[in-house]
Image (tube, rainbow, N blue to C red):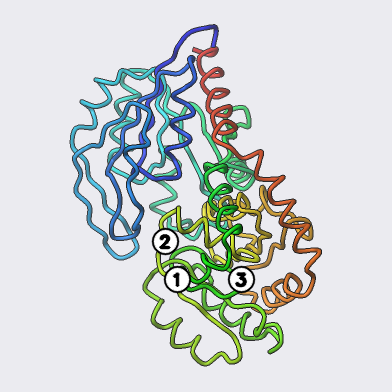
Amino acid sequence: MCGLTRRLVILTEIISPYRIPLFNALARHEAVSLHVIFLAETDPSLRQWRVYKDEIQFSYEVLPSWRRRIGRYNLLLNSGVDRALHRSSPDIILCGGYNYAASWQTLLWARNRRVPLVLWSESNQQDSRRGYAAIEYLKRRFMGACAAFVVPGISARSYLRNLRVADEKIFSAPNAIDNDLFATAANNAKQNAVSRRKDLGLPERYFLFVGRLVREKGVFDLLAAYAKLDASLKKQFGLVFAGDGACRQQLKEQAASITPGTVTFAGFSHREQLAAIYGLADALILPTYSDPWGLVVNEAMACGLPIIVSQVAGCAADLVKDNWNGFQISPRDVLSLHLAMENLAVHDEQRETMAANSLQRISGYSPETWCAGILSMMKSLSSNA
């Protein structure tokens, strides 16, 4: 960027623990003066994440907000958007979505002041949020005003290409987590495996699901696939659900009929405990019907796990290669899911090779890699200014 420091303002919904390492890494670059505007601290109706404010090493503010959930829609209104943008004086704005009133206020503010607005887009062709005419119309209007786009991977880039977005306007900044944090905690758990399993109430060996216990995550398909395993395999391998959600009780009732076998509901876990649960598992399974990305896959790979993931998860095309570090399956395909689980359960050497391959692949998905994508976008917009 020709030695100049450019002011980047990121507008995003909540203080997600996943994003803090990315923003911290970006703030350390001398070419960037970073300020983050959060629309809320968290969303307690959907997430139980801890807010790790003590880890924040970048300039930020949280806008006053009012939230209401109406059916499947999340209404979030903010005050002070224009004032926050004026005070932060951005050269470039990176907007994390188009579906908030504050996003549209930011678009108008940027257009009136000729500040480039960049959309941070994770949408893909399989996204269940697509298909509503009014939403698609608003999305296209918003996208038409954007100077560039940042995507996490292959699926999101293909989606924008299908909407006729010019390839030179699309920049990849791969979704990432703090790999070292998860790997270290997982290794510590492995070194104290017996006591940690006892503390956490976990089976000796198990397949793992991490996420919200809702039907669209494919949790009932996973339970059905586990039930299909031979009795001998179910005696060796349990199934652990780490998370909470509306379907927890129904899942528990159905799981009670599976015998032999062990189905454990570990509840919601913060990252420190969750990393231990990953570290003691044999594989992660994410049979979701729709997911913009699926950061639990990043976490599991950083902890050295093979992955079974549905093809519609945004991360699948980037992170999981069939028969190399796991398996991709079609959503709602219980038989394919069952066969993939059986394959991992039976072939110990293959499972260990896949675990090593996961560690190799995820090393390229770090906060620094994400920063490189953001810096590339900023350099391009600055040179075209």
- The residue where tag 2 is placed is 269
**Are there few (<14), some (14-19), or many (20+) residues within 10 Å of tag 3?**
many
Q: Which residue is drawn at 70% across and 45% down?
A: 361
Q: Is residue 141 left or right of residue 85?
A: right
Q: Which of 317 and 118 is in front in this view?
A: 317
Up the image or down, 62 lies above or below 235; here it is above
- C-alpha gap between disc 1 and disc 3: 13 Å
Instruction: Give coordinates of residue 278: x percent, y percent.
Output: 56, 60
Q: Do the residues labelled 3 and 2 touch (CB within 8 Å)?
A: no
Q: Residue flagged by tag 3: what amino acid is it?
A: Phe
- C-alpha gap between disc 1 and disc 2: 8 Å
Q: Residue at x 37, y 36 (%)?
A: 55
- C-alpha gap between disc 3 and disc 2: 17 Å
Q: Residue flagged by tag 2: what amino acid is it?
A: Ser
- The residue where tag 3 is placed is 207
Residue at the top extreme of this rendering: 3
- The residue where tag 1 is placed is 266
Which image quadrant is residue 175 in? top right
